Image (cartoon, rainbow, N blue to C red):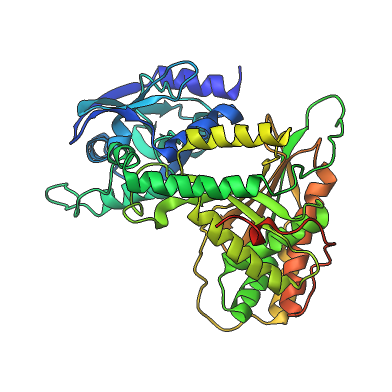
Amino acid sequence: MTQAAQVTDVIEASEVVMVPFAGEGCGVDALTWGQQHIWNAVLELGSPMNMCAVRELPAGARVQDYADELRFYASRFQSMRTRLRLTPGALPLQEVVATGEIPLRILDVPAHQDPAQVAAKLAAWQQDTPFDYEREFPINMTLIRHHGALTHLVMALCHFATDAVGAMTMYNDYIGRDPETGLASKPPAMHPLELAAQQRTPAALRQSEASLRYWDSLLRAIPMRRFPDPVDPGPGPGRYGQVRMDSPAMLLALRAIAARLDTDVSTALLGVFAVGVARIIGINPVVAQMVVSNRFRPGFAEIVSNVSQAGLFVADVADITVAEAIARSRQASMKAYKHAYFDFAKWKDLVAEVNRDRGGVVDLKCYYNDRPSQHRADPAGAPVTPQEIEAALPRTSAPQWTELPFFNERLMVTIDDVPGATGLLVLADTAYVPRARMAQLARELESLAIEAARDPDLRTHVSAGAPDPQQTQAR
């Protein structure tokens, strides 16, 4: 029996408490643009992309406390009482209900088992197990009980309903509620139904059209290919995977660069990414889709929904210094952020139209995802010294390979939030980026950051390619 089956059997045999809820607002509407984007990603990736977390519970924890927490989420946030109406060949509709019930599951762990390990296994299983989108609400809370005492809470959230920032907003509202009334201290932010209606207004449609014009101008100007012809990786598993490397020295180097250039770590990191990809993969101008959180837009900061969409980043880093590459990357990223809010269905039509006009497929399968933030604040403190960077180098973790069952991009570099280090994840289809090249790219990004921290005049050593489309795009 598989681990997933073992966990599932335990869940089916567990106690279930039905938690009633009642909240303001209900109705049926289209998905918002951010929801459309994540729904398409779920379908293309073949993974639900659920967000899961395990919380260790204090001694004396009661079932009623977590029933109240679940009720709070469902009553306050429309996204937590939303189900989908699915129609083949079309985008789903979202249906928000005003009242209903959500199950709170209780899993009794046998005395000989470690409840923490069971909670971790359950979270891993739930992360890859789709919700029943038409019948289930997009929040799943399971209490772990051992020797009659509650020890852990496992929470799973469906990604179409919210993102990590939205999930944290939910929890902060819950722990900040009035201890006597149980009510939140402030009204909730905009709900998805409100946002769906807002996206039909003239102002939102103008923003979408401006974004699509930006995409159109670049899609028609950039080279169509990013990668050489694929190489058959051979029979057997291992075609898709990720290489992980955590580097404290790289973070220190990036802080030194950011301080010298009066910018932030994320901007310095983006420039290093651009130069590293141009050097190791041979992509220049560097073209990558960026995961952009639209929470910088008015009214979006605390919305409990998914508002991220893709921005198109294009920068030529040939024959310049790394400092200049960072400056160009900042300019390119600002344009990408500005134009990452659009009607997703119209975007898909645009990409298909450009491909027809250019007689092929413009390759957009290179991604960059800075998970911590597009504009992460840097901690205050004394300037970073070269000696500190050198001293941290031995703590860099060896590149670690993890096989993936599927990956629908060619290359993706993800920056993970690791305390005291830059967490590098290089994900790839090894038919296009061999495993050794993936590890080489991770090491190159670290060494490039360290070299650039030492030498303000370090050059990119990237050969000139096609003209930078950012310089000639229509305005």
> In the visual, does 17 lie left or right of 139?
left
Residue 126 against residue 298 in the figure, above or below: above
Q: Name the spot of residue 218 as percent of width and height, x first.
A: 63, 49
Q: Residue at x 45, y 42 (%)?
A: 54
Residue 226 against residue 285 in the figure, above or below: above
Q: Residue at x 51, y 58 (%)?
A: 373
| Image quadrant containing the C terminus | bottom right
- Identify which residue, 218 or 16, lies in the foreground: 218
> In the visual, does 130 lie left or right of 436?
left
- Identify which residue, 390 or 373, lies in the foreground: 373
Q: Name the spot of residue 197 as percent of width and height, x first.
A: 29, 38
**Image label count:** 0
The quarter of the picture where residue 142 lies is top left
- Residue 5 appearing in the image: yes
> In the visual, does 466 lie left or right of 70?
right
Q: Residue at x 81, y 68 (%)?
A: 319
The quarter of the picture where residue 397 lies is bottom right
- Identify which residue, 430 or 288, lies in the foreground: 288
Q: Name the spot of residue 406 as percent of width and height, x first.
A: 68, 30
